[in-house]
Amino acid sequence: MTMIKLAGPIVGIGLLLASSAAIAETKVGADVAVNAGYASNPYGAVGGSGGTGSATLSGSFLPSVVMTSPTGTTTLGGEVTHTEYTNRYSATTDYGVSGSTSQQLSRLTALTASAGFRSFVHNSLHPIYDPIIGIPTDPSAPIIIDPSGATSFAERVETIYGSVGLSTSLSSRDSVSATGRFSDVRYPNGALASNRSYSSYGGGLSYQRLISRDTSIGLAMNIGRADYRDGSLGDGTQISPSVIFATKLAPRVSLNLSAGATFNETNVVGGKIKNTLFAGSASLCNQGDRSNLCASLSRSVSPTSFAGTSKVTAFGLSHSYRLDPRSEISTSLSYSRASSVGGLGRTTDYGTASVGYSRQVAERLSATLRLSYSDTFDSSFSRGSNFYGAVGLRYRLGNF
């Protein structure tokens, strides 16, 4: 069954490759990482951390292929991570594959696309990415986490996802873009009665006009749909028009804003409900020679496993600072909250914070240190907090 589920993203990755022009350069490599640490409450047991703590030992293998052509770049990647616990918990093996491409089809038109598959046993050792937004392709971008993430601790969750975007310039000042996306969230071993598998898909159109050298304004229209696998309760359709604004506050400081409304229709017991909700987002990034800082805040209507179709508020912040040519410190803060709009009356949230340090000790070898904290704060399904600390080594193979 797993191989069948892998077929979709593998075919998608093949299409990404087919879109590339003649390959000018191919780099093949892999990272091998080993981490040892301690978690006070990795699966969020309620009632404190007494008896819930465990030492951990994990090993990861992360292969990657980067193909560069005159028109763009295509990247393929994978991950396998095995984690052992010294106390109470069973070992886990997580894995995933992904592919992405960015191509300049002509002087005026560009294409981006991505697809992937992930199978992970959820816990609080690492971020649980929002399945709609996905994993950020920019390493400096904030991580947006799943507001229902903590409700699926100790469960294996499989996610298939993909997106495509096409943008073109109409003139020196005007541009249009179109996007499409899909994601599918499943619990292959069964789930808690409160968690539900679902599929989500949608698309959007936007128009932007440059009104000065560094500032643009525009309009966007997005349409989304969610279908739950165990029945139509909670299925929803969203139509979201918005105004968008982008500018540079300084040569290395960018600000992006959007504001609009979501017209939502959700299936409930006995029929449908319709409501209109505010939707918007804001992001601010400062990219320097040694330091990067990015923050984002958004409000949207989105499907979740626990709360059904929900109002989702998400915040993310990431910061990195290069201490010297070999050392870097990074911090991350993420929080998401979902509140049902379809009559379930459920609220769920999840927050994480982490700080990390890495130092290159040899040409291909780095030492790492990571400390993190995670918790739920205002959720119908409460979880206990977790403190996690780990030290590790990371070795790079190949011609990167």
Image (spheres, helix red, strand yellow):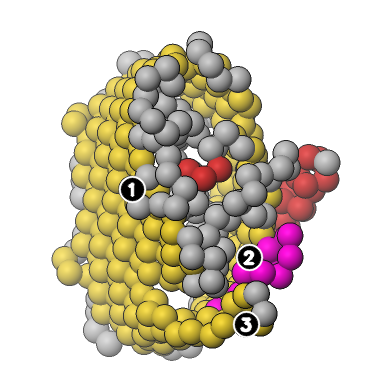
Q: Amino acid at mark 1?
A: Phe
Residue occupied by mark 2: 200
How crowded is the residue under tag 3: few (<14 C-alpha within 10 Å), some, or many (20+)? some
Residue 88 included in the magenta stretch of the image: no
Q: Quadrant of the N terminus?
A: top right
Per the image, label 2 sits on a secondary structure element best described as strand
Region rendered in magenta: 226-239
Per the image, label 3 sits on a secondary structure element best described as strand
Q: Amino acid at mark 3?
A: Lys
Query: Which of pointers 2 and 1 lies earlier in the amino acid sequence?
Result: 2
Is there a contact, CB below 8 Å, between mark 2 and mark 1?
Answer: no
How crowded is the residue under tag 1: few (<14 C-alpha within 10 Å), some, or many (20+)? some
Per the image, label 1 sits on a secondary structure element best described as loop
Q: Can residue 102 be seen by looking at this rendering? A: no
Residue 226 location (% of width, % of height)? 63, 69
The answer to whether residue 396 is left or right of residue 16 is left
Query: Which of pointers 3 and 1 lies earlier in the amino acid sequence?
Result: 3
Could you tell me how far apart the alpha carbons at marks 3 and 1 are, in whole angstroms?
31 Å
Residue occupied by mark 1: 377
Viewer-side residue, 362 vs 399? 362
The answer to whether residue 378 is left or right of residue 135 is left
Could you tell me how far apart the alpha carbons at marks 2 and 1 are, in whole angstroms?
27 Å
Residue 336 location (% of width, % of height)? 39, 55
Residue occupied by mark 3: 272
Could you tell me how far apart the alpha carbons at marks 2 and 3 are, in whole angstroms?
19 Å
